[in-house]
Image: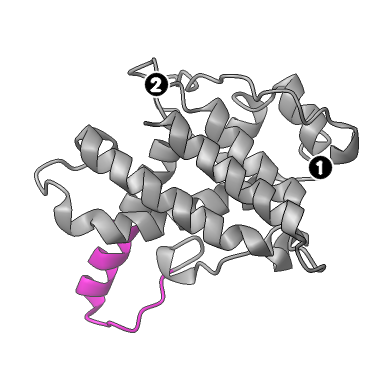
Amino acid sequence: MSESSHDSSRRPPAISKPKLKEGQSVTHQMLEDTAFNHPYYLEKTGGWLNVKIGPILRTIKECSQVALLEVEPDMDPYIKRFSDQGEPLQQRTYDIFLKRLDSLSVDMSEEFYSVITDMLESTLNLTSRRDKRWLWLWAMNERQKALQKLRIKKQRRGDQDDQGDGDSPSTYTPGYQEEEGFGSSEPEDSVQRRRRHLSIADLMNDTQ
């Protein structure tokens, strides 16, 4: 079912963090098959065929990396995982993340952008200590681990020009239009721009 047939007045459902079995880790496919295998998202994305989850999650990670690099000097170096840092720093980082997402949104189709903001809203879960902002925190931890691996790799090789492999932080480019053609080829009108900024404003207000 296409985005045009999706009822935009419906609120995204609250989605809890998946419970992992021993030895299991979170992957893009796992998120599609479990957490976001929900009628709301299946309808909105055409069963994850019209909008694919891979570029969505990579965009969330790219924005998370930008925020992480900005706050990294203020993080407690003794605390290894970003998700265990203090709440004030997490909130500031989340605001930076949302601003980065907003800046990229002008190059996204409205359909693609709305799936991202809906997934973030679904995973806010502000009243749950375990599930609060779990999708974003997962992305932050993933980018933190990738940066650490890249730095260790550069240190071992002594090569500051090393570009890393695959999904490494240094290979990110905003947009991802070349993968799935999600970039908007038409100029954005004022209604679309206002709608984008309202979505970001709603997310920021929900976290206060």
Report the residue at 67% width, 64% height from top.
107
Is 149 contained in the magenta span?
Answer: yes
In magenta, the rendered stretch is 146-164
Give percent across and percent down for residue 90.
29, 40
Contact? badges 1 and 2 (CB < 8 Å): no
Which residue sits at x=22%, y=37%?
Answer: 88
* Mark 1 or mark 2: whose residue is earlier in sequence: 2
- Alpha-carbon span between mark 1 and mark 2: 30 Å
Q: Taking the image as drawn, is residue 192 in sight?
A: yes
Work out whether residue 71 or residue 32 is closer to the camera in this orientation and state it.
Answer: 71
In the rendered structure, find residue 49 and report the number of the disc placed on it: 1
What residue is pinned by disc 2? 22
**Position above or below: 36 against 14:** below
Chief secondary structure of the magenta span? helix
Q: Is residue 25 visible?
A: no
> How many neighbours does mark 1 have within 10 angstroms: few (below 14), some (14-19), or many (20 or more)?
few
